[in-house]
Amino acid sequence: MPDFVTHPLVEPSWVAVHLTDSDVRIVDARWRGDGSGRELYRRGHIPGAVHLDWQHDLSRTDERGVGYLLLPPEQFAEVMEAVGIGDQTRVIAYAETDHSGAARLWWALRYYGHEQVAVLNGGWNRWVAEGLPISTAETRSVPASFTPRPQPRWLAQAREIEQALREADSRVCLVDTRPAEQYAGHAIWTPHGSLFLPSGQSWIALVDGRVMRGGHIPGAVHLHASRFLDPVDWTYLSHESILALAQEVGLNPEQRIITYCGSGISASLALLALYLGGYRDIALYDASWEEWGTDPDFPIE
């Protein structure tokens, strides 16, 4: 039985053999911006899997209007317990194509001190392509006991980034994992894709009244999250390829690496990839551009 701490990526063939293991819980983390992720689950999923939607089941909006933030400990524990994830459960998450929902759950569980969590390499797409079993039955969960134990090192907050910028700390490196047009300040993230700013304008008014600016955090390097995946079968690149890609943009394994995106989702994928590449002092800026881009006190490029 592999240790998911050292091997957080599992192959479809391994999962197929362990579908009925009593200590394994498979999570279908497919998500769509139109909210149809749960319907995809109903049409077909890996046998025994439960469905969790990162946006609707695992996130919250704070009093400032900053959305897509990770649930606080008690609420997160309630969600885990309801789907049968307890302290001793080995969790395997999967999504489709870019795996962002699965990687987000991997990070969230690691942040809350649950180490035995892995992501299915190649996700739903590869599972189907290999002709492995599919079910349409709703999975009944036996309630479990989940104990959240927050691990602060996995979560970066604005004050840490501000301090690093203020001190020009070369030990901290920020990685913007959004598409190039968002990094360049021409567009912002939405659940439906990039929303381009009006010509000649550096900001856009959101429906909730907030104003979001275009750009990136000063000094952040750009590395689109999807570059860590094989574009043919959506499997993660090898350890060596991930390391080479990271070093190409100047990431050093001795640095503290903080990833961010529009809402902390694709940045989770990059975080998992960097972990696979051997990086260990890594953290997710969960609030990402949802916070940084809407606070006029934060500097941007």
Image (tube, rainbow, N blue to C red):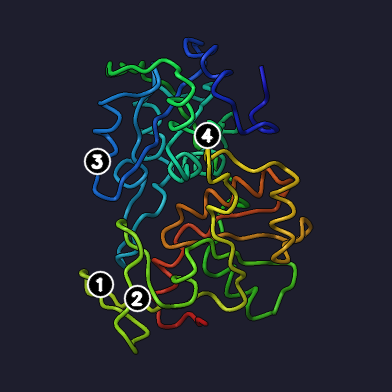
Mark 3–mark 2 distance (CA, rounded to whole Å): 26 Å
Q: Is label 4 or label 2 in front?
A: 4
Q: Quadrant of the N terminus?
A: top right
Q: Residue at x 62, y 47 (%)?
A: 273
Q: Secondary structure at mark 2?
A: strand
- Residue denoted by label 4: 122
Q: Is label 4 or label 3 in front?
A: 4
In this view, which residue lies farthest toward the right?
254
Q: Is label 1 or label 3 in front?
A: 3
Who comes first in sequence, dot 1 or dot 3? Answer: 3
Q: Do residues under tags 3 and 2 come within 8 Å of each other at their CB atoms? A: no
Place of residue 287 in the rendered image (x, y in percent of width and height, measured from the top left) = 44, 61
Q: Do residues under tags 1 and 2 come within 8 Å of each other at their CB atoms? A: yes
The tag on residue 301 is none
Q: Secondary structure at mark 4?
A: loop
Who comes first in sequence, dot 1 or dot 4? Answer: 4
Q: Say what amino acid the circle numbered 2 marks.
A: Met
Place of residue 88 in the rendered image (x, y in percent of width and height, measured from the top left) = 54, 21
Is residue 277 toward the left or the right of residue 267 in the image?
Answer: right
Q: Quadrant of residue 284?
A: bottom right
Q: Secondary structure at mark 1?
A: loop
The tag on residue 212 is 2
Q: Say what amino acid the circle numbered 4 marks.
A: Gly
In this view, which residue lies farthest toward the front?
232
Q: Is residue 230 above or below residue 93?
A: below
Q: Residues within 10 Å of mark 3 (few under 14, many from 20)?
A: few
- Residue denoted by label 1: 206
Who comes first in sequence, dot 1 or dot 2? Answer: 1
- Residue denoted by label 3: 36
Q: Do residues under tags 4 and 2 come within 8 Å of each other at their CB atoms? A: no
Mark 4–mark 2 distance (CA, rounded to whole Å): 34 Å
Q: Secondary structure at mark 3?
A: loop
